[in-house]
Image: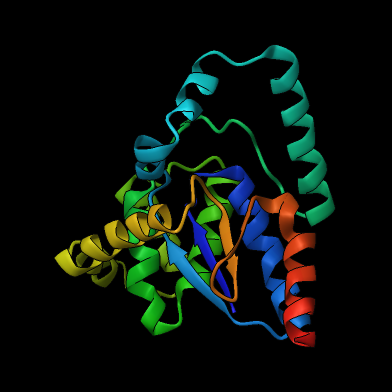
């Protein structure tokens, strides 16, 4: 089992979301998708992210941009960084993921939202963009907007975010293998694979 905590507003999460799926299929592992608000995590336990964003080290920023594109090319996805609206308010999209999960639509919608924001430079905070994504995914837009306004969905998104913090997470993507074995970031997926292999041998 892989618990995958994610927020669509993170480019590294886009990479990991894309790459974890074939890995899980290869290893016969189930993924428990856990939508969160990464801004809530930063505000609570990792505010240094904001300082780094406001005062970047030029050489490090240039390398990170190259690194991101290297990973995007390796993963076979288009990733524009930064998009026109950055950071984006992803709360409605993440509530949508939660609302769609019981219907089996989370992965399809999240994939479309990742592609729209990071590949298509679309502002996923806007209702019109979200409704267009719904149309692409054959989801009723009116039902979607009503669903994400439900208090239970709002509360569950906050609960997932608080749960990640309690488990020691500090950003997105964060993954746990078989309970307590935590990994952070797309580049840790080879270690996730090794952990799954080890669990299979146990």
Q: Residue at x 80, y 69 (%)?
A: 194
> Is residue 75 depicted above or below 193 in this figure?
above
Q: Position of residue 48 (x, y in %)?
A: 48, 26
> Is residue 78 depicted above or below 34 in this figure?
above
Nearest the viewer among 85 and 166 is 166
Q: Position of residue 53 (x, y in %)?
A: 52, 22
Q: Residue at x 80, y 61 (%)?
A: 190
Q: Position of residue 64 (x, y in %)?
A: 73, 30
Q: Residue at x 67, y 71 (%)?
A: 21
Along the horizontal axis of the image, is 68 left or right of 46?
right
Q: Residue furthest front?
A: 202
Residue 183: name its quadrant.
bottom right
Nearest the viewer among 32 and 132 is 32
Colour approach in the figure: rainbow
> Is residue 39 depicted above or below 66 in this figure?
below
Q: Position of residue 124 (x, y in %)?
A: 42, 47
Q: Quadrant of the N terminus?
A: bottom right
Residue 61: name its quadrant.
top right
Q: Residue at x 73, y 39 (%)?
A: 68
Q: How many marks?
A: 0
Q: Quadrant of the C terminus?
A: bottom right
Along the horizontal axis of the image, is 70 left or right of 180?
right
């Amino acid at each position: 089992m892989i618990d995958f905590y994610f927020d669509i507003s993170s480019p590294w999460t886009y990479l990991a979301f894309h790459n974890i799926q074939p890995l899980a299929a290869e290893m016969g592992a189930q993924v428990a998708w856990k939508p969160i608000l990464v801004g809530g995590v930063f505000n609570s336990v990792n505010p240094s992210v904001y300082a780094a964003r406001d005062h970047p080290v030029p050489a490090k920023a240039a390398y990170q941009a190259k690194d991101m594109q290297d990973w995007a090319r390796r993963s076979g996805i288009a990733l524009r960084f930064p998009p026109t609206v950055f950071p984006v308010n992803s709360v409605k999209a993440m509530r949508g993921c939660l609302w769609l999960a019981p219907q089996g639509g989370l992965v399809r919608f999240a994939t479309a939202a990742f592609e729209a924001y990071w590949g298509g430079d679309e502002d996923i905070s806007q209702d019109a963009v979200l409704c267009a994504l719904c149309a692409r995914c054959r989801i009723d837009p009116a039902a979607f907007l009503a669903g994400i306004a439900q208090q239970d969905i709002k509360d569950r998104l906050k609960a997932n975010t608080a749960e990640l913090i309690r488990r020691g997470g500090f950003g997105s993507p964060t993954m746990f293998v078989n309970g307590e074995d935590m990994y952070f970031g797309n580049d840790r997926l080879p270690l996730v694979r090794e952990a799954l292999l080890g669990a299979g041998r146990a």
